[in-house]
Image (cartoon, rainbow, N blue to C red):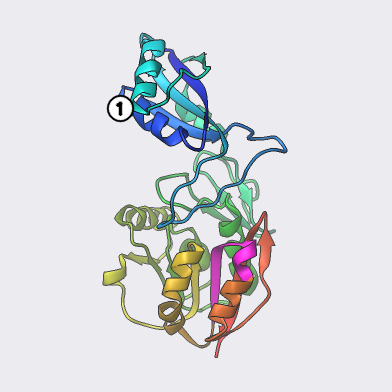
Amino acid sequence: MPWQVLKIPADSATATALSDALMELGALSVSIEDAHAGTDAEQPIFGEPGCLAETWNDSQVSALFETDADIAAILQQACDVAEIKSLPPYHIEQLAEQDWVRLTQSQFDPIKISDRLWIVPSWHAAPDPAAINLVLDPGLAFGTGSHPTTRLCLQWLDANLRGGESVLDYGCGSGILAIASKRLGAGEVIGIDIDPQAVQSARDNAARNIVDAHFYLPDAVPGAQYAVVIANILSNPLKVLAPMLASRVQIGGRIVLSGILAEQAEEMRALYGEWFNMHPALIDEGWACLSGIRR
């Protein structure tokens, strides 16, 4: 069955209200995108939990409808609900039926982290069977190896783990960093996440990769210190959690922090410098990874 895709230009003042109204009026899905995506005028926006969501100055609202939906009438109603005085220009595209599973899979290829470490979706053959190949599929929990913060953390683990270290992965998401730690020779490996779905996803991924790593919600985690604590979350939580994360690192142990924008790195480095001898940041596509040794 084909679908209709309604595309409407909007500004930062109207995009969210318009998308909410379209969902209320029967859209199957709605997205807000940068109208200049893929051009020199593209506008990066970075958000964090607890911060007001932003939209682009020039946005495009895309709404998916069934083929028999009366798009013009729905858009007029949405504008009334969103208190948009005049009907904006719009166009409609036809979206043909496709093999959506195959299409989604085609967008995820194996990711080379280093000469010996790869992330490989389950439907792909490993490009280097002799490498350490982590089998991981995109899912609800963050962490497939494609984002710069995850890559930076994986590269740090690959370069620095010597074998036998205890590792705490705080904000484990899919479990990718904990699983990689174990495959790279770590000893006891624990992952923590506030999201029960992430904890279950991490457990499933650990089982798929045949590694002995354990995952918990924060209230259930054993109290202990670790040789390596890694937290790939975001800067605001990293600030709030700094004393707790520092307390989980053994004297002489190491902390690894990511989810930090490059321009936030020095502030975070100074904050964690209260407990750690911090190293210069590693940068990838505007994101930073910090590490340090516990004093």
Task: Name the residue at the right extreme.
Answer: 40
Camera-nearest residue between 270 and 21: 21
Q: Does the magenta stretch include residue 264?
A: yes
Viewer-proximal residue among 164 and 29:
29
Q: Is 94 on the left or on the right of 191, as rendered?
A: right
Residue 121: give x, y in percent of width and height.
Answer: 52, 44
Task: Name the amino acid type tagged 1.
Answer: Glu
Callout 1: 10 Å neighbours few (<14), some, many (20+)? few
**Residue 283 relative to residue 82: left or right:** right
Residue 182 appearing in the image: no
Inspect the magenta stretch and tell me whether residue 176 lies in it: no
Which residues, given as a range, are shown in magenta? Answer: 254-265
Query: Residue 223 is drawn in which quadrant?
Result: bottom left
The image position of residue 77, as x and y in percent, is 34, 18
Prevailing SS of the magenta stretch:
strand
Which residue was labeled with disc 1?
24
| Front in this rendered view, residue 58 or 99 | 58
Q: Which residue is drawn at 42% across and 36% down?
A: 16
Name the image quarter holding residue 281: bottom right
Residue 44 visible (yes or no): yes
Classify mark 1: helix, strand or loop.
helix
The percent coordinates of residue 188 (x first, y second) are: 42, 75
Q: Quadrant of residue 132?
A: bottom right
Q: Percent x, y for residue 43?
A: 63, 42
Residue lying farthest to the front in this orientation: 85
Q: In this view, does 280 lie above or below 130?
A: below
